Amino acid sequence: MSNHLQELLDKEGRYFFHTYKRLHLDIVRGEGVYLIDREGKRYLDFFGGLAVNALGYGHPAVLAAIHAQADRYLHLSNYYLQEPQILLAERLIRTTGYAKIFLSNSGTEAMEGAIKLARKWGKPQHKTTLLSLTNSFHGRTMGALTLTQRPKYREGYDPMLPNISHVGFNDVAALTRSVDASTLGIVLEFIQGEGGIFPVSREFAEALQELRLKYQFLIIADEIQCGIGRTGTFFGFEHSGIHPDIVVIAKAIGGGLPLGAILGNSRVADTFGVGEHGTTFGGNPVACAAGIAVMEQVVDGKLMEQAGRTGEYLLQAFRAMQEEFPGVIKEVRGRGCMIGVDLSREGQPIVDELQRRGILVNCTNTTVLRMLPPYIVTREECDRVVASLRELLKGGS
């Protein structure tokens, strides 16, 4: 470890609340799908900024948009009309078919707003109970944390918000038992990210659709990780055939800057009135300018389709590896550039060894190698990751 890196780690330990387990890397810049440390070592990044860096690092369209807007102004109060906000909203509405939008700073802030939107919508109809799924992750603020069932995130923060319960993931019978006329809405990731890349089953999605028709509750989709083209479609829920009433997005939409949004259909479009929700920094004009550039690249530039093709290529490669090492790889899951390789043992030692080889992946839920590469990654770069993992498994790592 270099003296400079040790100095940074020492200062981080002195000055910060100890909330992060930092990687021992001294990154000084990013280029495309690579991160580069102070000594010049290049790391192929399949960590992807936890799904933020969909276009990689230093994408010229994003940088140009940021520079142009920064020369105009960095911030205005939301009392003012701001053209970057309007243009991004117009683009998102046109692409998705939703009716209204609210811009936030982050995914968890957007989820908090979605809870408020749902509760205000349901109050006149005496609909009070929100449901979410086990193994979920929706954020760290109190509303999002209440929706998040996993104990490791909730311990020590009781009491949680009232009138929020959890249903077993992909458990159709439990879902059917849990809903009734008082159900306000169901919040779900159609592909669970932090939970280990678990897609909602076709049977569960069909039951959810039927129950919504019967009880008229809201479906609220958390697309923070799987949205904005990552799975080969603009939203992850498009693979299920369901069209949710409220959608929460963030991560990739800002091109690396903090940006999130709530999208709502006609059922909830008139729920919020003036002064009933707000944010100081949400919809920052520089972030919105970056978001417009992201939309142009992902939709017009066909990177969404490229992400789908790349993901299929990787899935086939990892499933072939599963056949080769059935005692080590339990399952390969995912869509597009959102893939989980579920191991029969803890994944962190493999993550550490890949890092030594110049490849960055994430381990989530203890055993799942989670891969969230930028959509611009090439097949040759994918082959490098596959070959390195195969070498490790052959060697017994």
Image (tube, rainbow, N blue to C red):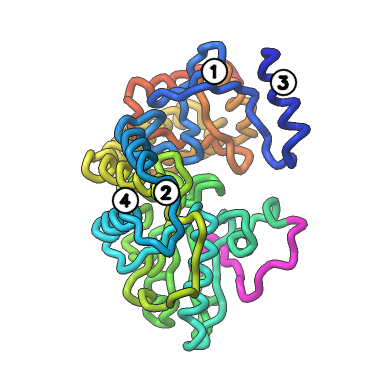
Q: Nearer the viewer, residue 239 or 290?
A: 290
The secondary structure type at the circle numbered 4 is loop
Badge 3 crowding class, 10 Å Cα cut-off, few under 14, some 14 to 19, many 20 or more, is few
Q: Which residues are magenta?
A: 155-172
| Distance CA(mark 4)–CA(mark 3) | 42 Å
At x 41% / y 29%, what residue is drawn?
Answer: 57
Across and down, in percent, residue 119 comes to 52, 77
Of discs 3 and 1, which sits in the foreground? 3
Q: Nearer the viewer, residue 327 or 205?
A: 205
Q: Are marks 4 and 1 in contact (CB under 8 Å)?
A: no
Q: Earlier in the sequence, mark 2 or mark 4?
A: 2
Badge 1 crowding class, 10 Å Cα cut-off, few under 14, some 14 to 19, many 20 or more, is some
At x 43% / y 73%, what residue is drawn?
Answer: 218
At x 31% / y 62%, what residue is drawn?
Answer: 241
| Distance CA(mark 3)–CA(mark 2) | 36 Å
Across and down, in percent, residue 139 comes to 58, 54
Badge 2 crowding class, 10 Å Cα cut-off, few under 14, some 14 to 19, many 20 or more, is many
Across and down, in percent, residue 89 comes to 32, 58
Per the image, is 206 magenta?
no
The secondary structure type at the circle numbered 2 is loop
Quadrant for the C terminus, please: top right
Magenta region, mostly helix, strand or loop?
loop
Which residue is tagged 4? 234
The secondary structure type at the circle numbered 3 is helix
Which residue is tagged 2? 226
Q: Which residue type carries mark 4?
A: Phe
| Distance CA(mark 3)–CA(mark 1) | 15 Å
Q: Which residue type carries mark 3?
A: Glu
Which residue is tagged 1? 37
